[in-house]
Image (cartoon, grey):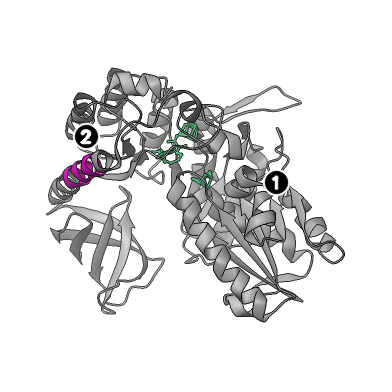
Amino acid sequence: MQKLYIETYGCQMNVADSETVASILAEENYVVCQEMKEADLILVNTCSVRENAENKIYRRLEIFRQARRAKPELKIGVIGCMAERVQKDLIDNHGVNLVAGPDSYRKLPALVNELDFNENSIDTKLSIEETYSGICPTRLESNGISGFVSITRGCNNFCTYCIVPYTRGRERSRDPEDILLECGDLAKRGYKELTLLGQNVNSYIWEDKDSGQKTTFSSLMGLVAETVPEMRIRFTTSHPKDMSDDTLRIMASHENICKNIHLPVQSGSNKVLKSMNRKYTREDYMNRIEAIRTILPDCTIGTDIFCGFPAETPEDHAETLSLMKGVGFNSAFMFKYSERPGTYAAKNLPDDIPEEVKGKRLQEIIDLQIKLSLKSNQDDIGQVYEVLAEGLSKKSDQELFGRTSQNKVAVFPKLNYQAGDLVKVKIRDCTSATLKGDVV
Ligand code: SAH
Ligand code: SF4
Ligand code: F3S
């Protein structure tokens, strides 16, 4: 038995991939360990989406190198998006032994074995068809309640700022049979909630080779919801240009599909959206919001926003703020633009917004979002929600925390409940981040 220590950074896709990697290496007698110092092999699953994400990894690699000085037989591997982007430089300049891109995980056993007679090994070929069909992920460091199932890999959208299409390759959908098997496996293991994952889940499409029958994202969600009726279903990420009314109707007709949509807007300015190649306008986006409000009145909406894209004016920034107010997002991931080498923007659009202007704009976005989140939470006071308990609250062992279908965190007295229970909670109080309530 060899010991494998995995650290995972970046998006949920990486969390899901680390589980696939653990499963592939389990076949080679690798067991996952929780302590770095026990490891024979360290793998770090990496993210390239912003420069600071990569800097964090470079700092970790320094720590791993130090560990190897004390234990020379230790092997260090980089997998994921940064492996794909930075390639051999990780070996040449950062002390890495093994580099494997997101479509090379089936080759990991061979790459690891190669280290017995070679100082290093690398495979970063992208594939147009790899979906890791037939591999059942080993569930890692999960709470045993909420699991991920990836339904697409890659991205074809080429937003001008984004590295993902280069690190993850072309978009491909997984066989619905594989997806349903994985969902069923989670249910069998006692999981209560699953999240369907893809860079743009709405463009999921599968054509059955024999019957020619097509499965779309909406039909897939219907299938999943009916295959595991006792589980909660979530999905991320939705692209506004592909978010259909069909999907909203499927959500409305299945109680176990959670009423929360993550719909990244990025900017409120049509000029900036066009230059980002997002393929929708502010008006198109607001039309989707209207559709959500009409078809799913109790649905919350989250988003991603970043400021300081090339040529963003104070007026463009003001339009982002006004769109945020107009929608009333209940949550948002907020960033400053970070130029990524190789993207269209890096080649053609000068990164011309000064760092302090980016910082000031980001702070305004964050301050506004805190107000919007607080308002959205205050509107819930007095209402009763079903909360899926996930564990003890950070502040008190007499309280549990969990999430509502709307993906809001709620804290309530533990009583005789435990993680995994669905509990009806009446909201009494809130902050911008948390609902507080009593069991009813
Ligand atoms: N596929 C998803 C998200 C991918 S990355 C989507 O299409 O929305 C997650 C978020 O990171 C993006 O939504 C965007 O807000 C942000 N992001 C991506 N590239 C970035 C960059 N170069 N600089 C700053 N933020 C970026
Ligand atoms: Fe990146 Fe755009 Fe694809 Fe999202 S849709 S992963 S932002 S290129
Ligand atoms: Fe990062 Fe790759 Fe995900 S760049 S956000 S880990 S797809």
Please give the label number shown on residue 411. Answer: none
Left or right: where 437 falls relative to 52: left
Element type at mark 1? loop
Cβ of mark 1 under 8 Å from ligand 3: the answer is: no
Label 1, residues with CA under 10 Å away: few <14, some 14-19, many ≥20: many
Write down the quadrant of residue 185 in the picture. bottom right
Q: Position of residue 326 (x, y in %)?
A: 18, 30
Residue 90 within the magenta-colored segment of the rendering: no
Element type at mark 2? helix
- Quick one: 305 or 183, which is closer to the camera? 305
Q: Residue at x 79, y 56 (%)?
A: 111
Distance from the alpha carbon under mark 2 to that under mark 1: 38 Å
Q: Is residue 432 above or below residue 279?
A: below
Contact check, label 2 and label 1, Cβ < 8 Å: no
Asked if residue 41 shows in the view, the reply is yes
Mark before the other along the chain sequence, 2 or 1: 1
Q: Image quadrant for the C terminus?
A: bottom left
Asked if residue 190 shows in the view, the reply is no
